[in-house]
Image (cartoon, rainbow, N blue to C red):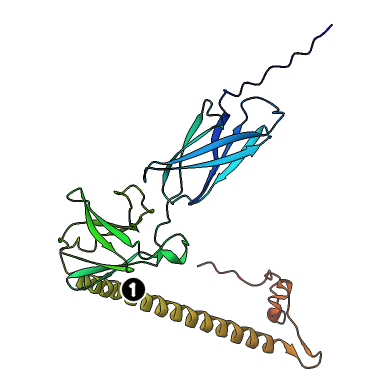
């Protein structure tokens, strides 16, 4: 025996398993499940998005009968922080999740050009790869002095370069360039960082570069010259040895050439000593020959 029991849906329950599936720079995908399984009618959800930086609210309505709901929140700002609340339209219990969008990328190709009494920071425009970035927003530059262990804000600019002066000799610096932070530094771009220690020798940086390049040239040029001379001598020795061996073999082959046979004849080791065949063989001593022993 069995009995079928159908539970009465409770519309006061909150949505289940609310979480973020994917976040981008200007959007976020959230997902949740209905308060109970297999809804038999359309359910109206209220999705409230609270901007924790700007202190603003937006409410979106989602109507569906699906047990699992996936919704994309659009028109967000890069690097923003949001509090998302989902509940049924009858203002039942709520589920919430906090999300943070992806910040703007760091500027590319950050480099330093050294002048006599200052340096220039250069980088590529962030608008080349970020459609959400406007050049009017600008960039801000920070500097970290590792010797003093302090970080300083140098300023901001809407250009793609920045002049830095009054650097101290013997100090190492790290420079960062990023999209300018908005709303009291709460929405910033990713920083591009570059180390700078050209003043560590206590000399002018341009003179230091010239001296180092001269020293390197003074070492590399003689070494390359010696290598070339050594290779040239080696080739000459190999060539002379090859010529000597070739001449010796040619002379040896010509001395054994038979014009009658039209080829060179080389004797084996058994034929050595044939030139002595005509010499008289000593067979022994005769009895009538006196032997003298000194």
Where 150 sits versus 33, above or below?
below
Q: Residue 257 location, x and y as percent?
A: 73, 89
Work out whether 187 lies above or below 169: above
User: Seen in the image, is 220 located left or right of residue 29?
Assistant: left
Q: Residue 136 occupies which quadrant of the picture? A: bottom left
Name the residue carrying label 1: 220
Q: Position of residue 65 (x, y in %)?
A: 68, 34
Left or right of 136 in this view: 43: right
222 vs 133, nearest the viewer: 133
Q: Residue at x 70, y 72 (%)?
A: 269
Q: Which residue is found at the position 75% from the left and 83% from the top? A: 265
Look at 62% across and 21% down and name the residue there: 10
Q: Is residue 151 above or below residue 7?
A: below
Q: Quadrant of residue 283?
A: bottom right
Decide which of 106, 238 is in the foreground and name it. Answer: 106
Whether 244 is drawn above or below 287: the answer is: below
Residue extending farthest front: 90
Tell me the quarter of the picture where residue 88 sits: top right
Residue 187: image location, x then y, percent: 36, 49
Q: Quadrant of the N terminus?
A: top right
Name the element at disc 1: helix
Q: Residue furthest top?
A: 1
Badge 1, how many Cα within 10 Å: few under 14, some, many 20+?
Answer: few
- Between 116 and 139, the one nearer to me in the picture: 139
Q: Residue at x 61, y 35 (%)?
A: 44
The number of numbered discs placed on residues in the rendered structure image is 1
- Where's residue 192, x and y in %? 36, 57
């Amino acid at each position: 025996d069995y009995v079928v029991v159908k539970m009465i849906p409770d519309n006061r329950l909150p949505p289940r398993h609310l979480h973020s599936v994917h976040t981008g720079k200007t959007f976020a995908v959230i997902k949740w499940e209905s308060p109970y399984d297999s809804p038999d009618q359309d359910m109206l959800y209220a999705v409230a998005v609270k901007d924790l930086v700007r202190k603003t609210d937006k409410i979106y309505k989602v109507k569906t009968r699906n047990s699992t709901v996936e919704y994309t929140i659009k028109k967000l700002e890069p690097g923003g922080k949001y509090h998302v609340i989902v509940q049924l339209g009858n203002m039942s219990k709520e589920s919430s999740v906090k999300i943070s969008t992806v910040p703007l990328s760091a500027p590319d190709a950050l480099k330093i050009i050294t002048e006599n009494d200052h340096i220039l920071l250069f980088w590529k425009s962030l608008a080349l790869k970020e459609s959400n970035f406007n050049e009017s927003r600008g960039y801000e530059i920070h500097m970290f002095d590792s010797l003093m262990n302090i970080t300083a804000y140098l300023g901001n600019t809407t250009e793609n370069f920045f002049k830095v002066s009054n650097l101290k000799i013997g100090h190492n610096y790290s420079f960062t360039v990023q999209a300018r932070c908005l709303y009291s530094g709460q929405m910033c771009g990713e920083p591009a960082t570059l180390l700078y220690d050209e003043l560590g020798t206590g000399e002018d940086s341009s003179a230091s570069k010239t001296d180092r390049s001269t020293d390197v040239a003074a070492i590399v040029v003689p070494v390359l010259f010696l290598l070339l001379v050594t290779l040239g001598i080696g080739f000459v020795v190999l060539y002379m040895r090859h010529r000597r061996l070739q001449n010796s073999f040619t002379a040896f082959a010509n001395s054994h050439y038979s014009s009658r046979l039209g080829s060179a004849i080389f004797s084996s080791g058994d034929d050595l000593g044939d030139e002595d065949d005509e010499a008289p063989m000593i067979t022994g001593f005769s009895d009538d020959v006196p032997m003298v022993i000194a």
